């Protein structure tokens, strides 16, 4: 098995100084300094040009220098992306090309000749045919996609061969493996041993494992997880490779495919309903509709020759953050919604030749967005949306076992989880003890949101002999349990915060 470990780091260009400081100190500095000290580590990194400039502007040059040193020492390879983190399927081709070119120009300026990306990362892994065609014409060899884009979640893509995207310039799609990526991001895996147990079946095969994760998860969102990642990367049993090396081990052109539009947060059910960009563009979300109408109004008015300064402002206004934080299922931030709408309004006002009437229409959009967002908050709609989101993926395990004749399986699972909770507590592994404790509470109260699958995977690893006794009966129940869940589960762990 060849491990392609990909990390994506990004912060909005107007991120608050306090949050940026925390992210740098809790995540970026310990991670990149740790990679420098970890023999054998190979990191595939995406850093948006907007974040590169932000780090320089705020005086975090040491982070840039550590990343540059990693690349010089052949421990890091860059990927390409769009500079201001827009959702590419909803941009014109010329806007995609410009943002990618600006991203390359910015990162080349600060990282120098070591910035030589071979692979393209579309922000949020948001893919459409237009994105594939544009990236292919720009000469990139690879594009990172989520497994959902293979066949809409109906079938896992083979990772022992390399596909080619139809009617492209031999563009190779590389698919993110959700299970391992999410186990790492969720802190389910807490040691080198557990990681090896998780991938032990894959280790025997000639295949690639592409994990793709937000870098800020390690240390910032989950304190201490950066140390665990570094320990895992120090292992010698798994060969780590760069994107550019993958064709050394696998033949290309085995099969031509047409990837399905989607993101790394999409669920199979989203694809079936045609709403795979749900978290950023929900057709039933009034705030989303107003946001997109306002942005498209700006883009229509700015569809002419602009100075570089004004064009950059327009590009910044395309950032996807404002849409993500207006989803309400469960992510919500009035501050981010207002900030995005204000950026569009100020950009609109700076356009040359803009009329008073056009500015007034823009101000009307801004006020409607803010008014709608505050009304959603005051009326309790956001609270209801968040609850609906959680309940949508709730299939109580107790109903699938204890209440349908599986009492023995249910009690055995509870017993095993309790044993692991007490052991973790004795070993002062409190995060894992909390995981077990929460799993027990959720199972007993029928509030499990399918975290149990992760818990059961861990039980298989940590208690193979005890688990083997109930495995056949549990698998029979799980097959029914998983059938529905596999269609509705999102592509990333639920916790995601700025």
Image: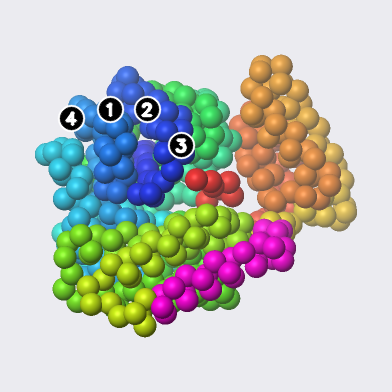
Q: Earlier in the sequence, mark 1 or mark 3?
A: 3
Q: Residue 276 at x, y = what percent?
A: 49, 68
Q: CA distance from mark 2 to mark 1?
A: 8 Å
Residue 156 placement, left or right of 439 = left
Q: Residue furthest front?
A: 356
Task: Return the residue at label 1.
Answer: 62
Q: What predominant SS class does the magenta segment belong to?
A: helix
- Give the residue displayed 31% in from the left and 32% down from the top: 60
User: Considering depth in this image, is 350 or 107 the residue closer to the camera?
Assistant: 350
Residue 491 magenta = no
Dot 1: within a 10 Å radius of its alpha carbon, few (fewer than 14), some, or many (20 or more) residues?
Answer: few
Residue 381 magenta = yes
- Give the residue displayed 37% in from the left and 46% down from the top: 10
Give me the disc on residue 29.
2
Q: Which residues are magenta?
A: 360-387
Q: CA distance from mark 3 to mark 2?
A: 15 Å
Task: Return the residue at label 4.
Answer: 72
Look at the numbered disc 4 and give the secondary structure of its residue: helix
């Amino acid at each position: 098995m060849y491990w392609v470990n990909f990390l994506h780091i990004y912060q909005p260009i107007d991120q608050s100084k306090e949050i940026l400081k925390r992210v740098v100190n809790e995540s970026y500095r310990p991670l990149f300094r740790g990679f420098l000290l970890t023999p054998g580590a190979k990191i595939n990194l995406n850093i948006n040009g907007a974040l590169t400039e932000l780090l320089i502007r705020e005086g975090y040059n040491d982070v840039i220098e550590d990343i540059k040193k990693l690349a010089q020492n052949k421990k890091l390879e860059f990927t390409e992306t769009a500079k201001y983190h827009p959702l590419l399927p909803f941009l014109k081709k010329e806007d995609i090309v410009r943002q990618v070119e600006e991203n390359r120009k910015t990162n080349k300026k600060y990282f120098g000749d070591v910035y030589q990306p071979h692979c393209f990362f579309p922000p949020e892994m948001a893919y459409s045919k237009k994105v594939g065609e544009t990236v292919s014409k720009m000469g990139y060899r690879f594009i990172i996609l989520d497994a959902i884009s293979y066949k809409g979640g109906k079938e896992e893509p083979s990772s022992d061969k390399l596909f080619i995207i139809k009617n492209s310039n031999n563009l190779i799609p590389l698919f993110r493996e959700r299970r391992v990526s999410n186990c790492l991001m969720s802190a389910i895996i807490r040691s080198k041993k557990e990681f090896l147990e998780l991938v032990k079946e894959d280790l025997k095969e000639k295949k690639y494992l592409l994990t793709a994760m937000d870098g800020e998860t390690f240390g910032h969102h989950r304190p201490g997880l950066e140390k665990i990642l570094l320990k895992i990367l120090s292992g010698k049993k798994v060969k780590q490779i760069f994107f550019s090396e993958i064709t050394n081990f696998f033949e290309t052109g085995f099969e031509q495919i047409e990837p399905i539009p989607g993101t790394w947060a999409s669920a199979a059910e989203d694809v079936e309903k045609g709403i795979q960009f749900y978290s950023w563009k929900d057709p039933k979300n009034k705030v989303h509709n107003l946001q997109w109408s306002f942005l498209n109004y700006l883009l229509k008015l700015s569809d002419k020759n602009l100075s570089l300064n004004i064009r950059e402002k327009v590009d910044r206004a395309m950032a996807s953050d404002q849409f993500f934080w207006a989803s309400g299922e469960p992510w919500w931030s009035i501050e981010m919604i207002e900030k995005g709408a204000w950026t569009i309004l100020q950009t609109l006002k700076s356009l040359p030749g803009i009329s008073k009437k056009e500015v007034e229409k823009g101000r009307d959009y801004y006020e409607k967005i803010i008014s709608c967002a505050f009304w959603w908050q005051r009326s309790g709609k956001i609270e209801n949306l968040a609850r609906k989101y959680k309940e949508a993926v709730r299939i109580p395990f107790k109903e699938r076992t204890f209440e349908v004749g599986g009492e023995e399986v249910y009690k055995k699972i509870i017993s095993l989880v309790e044993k692991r909770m007490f052991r973790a507590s004795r070993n002062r592994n409190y995060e894992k003890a909390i995981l077990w404790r929460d799993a027990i509470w959720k199972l007993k109260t029928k509030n499990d949101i399918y975290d149990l699958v992760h818990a059961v995977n861990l039980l298989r690893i940590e208690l193979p002999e005890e688990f083997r006794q109930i495995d056949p009966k549990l698998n029979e129940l799980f097959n029914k349990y998983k059938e529905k869940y596999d269609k509705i589960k999102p592509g990333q762990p639920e916790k995601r915060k700025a």
